[in-house]
């Protein structure tokens, strides 16, 4: 699971938790709730269905029916056409706080889609996916989002006045077809320094808007999802590069400070290794 010298410098390299069932097909094509076309280097082999358009797929749901908090339609819990295997309908409540909802009895945290909703999202996007793999794919999806939230909290904890228990994920959007500026820089660096940087682009990207209730400030975070070489036992490994977007002077300063701290640690380590 260790980072290699040729990889970008993501802030987290999560591995699936011990005891996780074997997975034949790792993560879905990016986040299927958002992806409209195959992301680069998706770890899961997929074949577009016969009904999928040869051009860039468009969301078939009218925009006025999308949830403005996540740009997702309401996904059905009913089986998809030609579905052979029943899938669970239970939804897992995440650890990620969300804004208050007008719906009665709505949880104060974001809910992950059920395996049936997840499968319906894949079908809606025109992907043929083994039904028996969906539950494991949902587990990976949820696991990566929990890991991403943990990285967000690490950034937020750098502020001594932060009230971490009050921070909430206000809204988010998947952008699998849009490379972040940092990802573009890494790909350019890989062209000139192939031994130090990976030429593999992220297989997904999310933009998360985090709200700090004590000040009313909102901060956008960019998350690039990378696949990494699997463990010897075949367990999939992923890298998440989570950082505040360069939308404000405060975020720019924080990024510079963190980059400087990382460079200092690397220099100290090289000095120690030389001696």
Image (cartoon, helix red, strand yellow):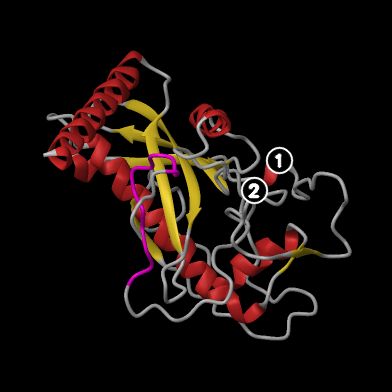
Residue at 62% in and 71% down: 77
Q: What is the distance, in whole Å, between disc 2 and disc 1 at their CAs? A: 26 Å
Compared with 147, 267 (above or below) is above
In reply to whether residue 16 is colored magenta, the answer given is yes
**Residue 49 image-quadrant placement:** bottom right
Q: Which residue is mark 1?
A: 63
Residue 255 in sight in this render = yes
Compared with 172, 2 (above or below) is below
> Please, what secondary structure does the residue beneath circle 1 have?
helix
Q: Which residue is mark 2?
A: 40
The range drawn in magenta is 6-17
**Residue 5 image-quadrant placement:** top left
Seen from the viewer's position, the closer of residues 178 and 62 is 178
Q: Residue furthest top?
A: 249
- Label the magenta part by its dominant secondary structure: loop
The percent coordinates of residue 117 (x first, y second) are: 60, 67
Residue at 42% in and 51% down: 239
């Amino acid at each position: 699971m260790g980072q290699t010298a040729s990889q970008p410098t993501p802030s987290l390299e999560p591995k699936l938790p011990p005891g996780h069932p074997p997975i034949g097909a790792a993560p879905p094509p990016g986040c299927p709730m958002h992806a409209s076309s195959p992301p680069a280097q998706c770890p899961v082999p997929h074949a577009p269905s016969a009904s999928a358009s040869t051009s860039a797929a468009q969301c078939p749901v009218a925009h006025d029916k999308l949830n403005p908090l996540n740009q997702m339609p309401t996904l059905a819990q009913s089986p998809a056409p030609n579905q052979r295997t029943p899938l669970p309908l239970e939804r897992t409540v995440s650890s990620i706080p969300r804004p208050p909802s007008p719906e009665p009895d709505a949880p104060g945290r974001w809910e992950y889609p059920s395996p049936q909703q997840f499968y319906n999202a894949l079908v809606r996007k025109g992907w043929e996916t083994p039904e028996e793999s969906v539950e494991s794919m949902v587990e990976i999806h949820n696991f990566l989002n929990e890991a991403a939230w943990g990285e967000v909290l690490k950034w937020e904890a750098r502020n001594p006045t932060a009230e971490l228990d009050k921070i909430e994920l206000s809204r988010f959007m998947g952008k699998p077809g849009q490379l972040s500026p940092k990802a573009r820089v890494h790909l350019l660096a890989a062209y000139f320094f192939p031994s130090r940087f990976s030429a593999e682009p992220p297989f997904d990207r999310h933009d998360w808007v985090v709200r700090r209730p004590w000040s009313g400030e909102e901060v956008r975070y960019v998350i690039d999802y990378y696949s990494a070489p699997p463990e010897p036992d075949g367990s999939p490994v992923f890298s998440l590069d989570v950082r505040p977007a360069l939308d404000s002077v405060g975020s720019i300063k924080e990024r510079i400070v963190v980059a400087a701290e990382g460079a200092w640690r690397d220099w100290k380590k090289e000095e120690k290794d030389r001696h």
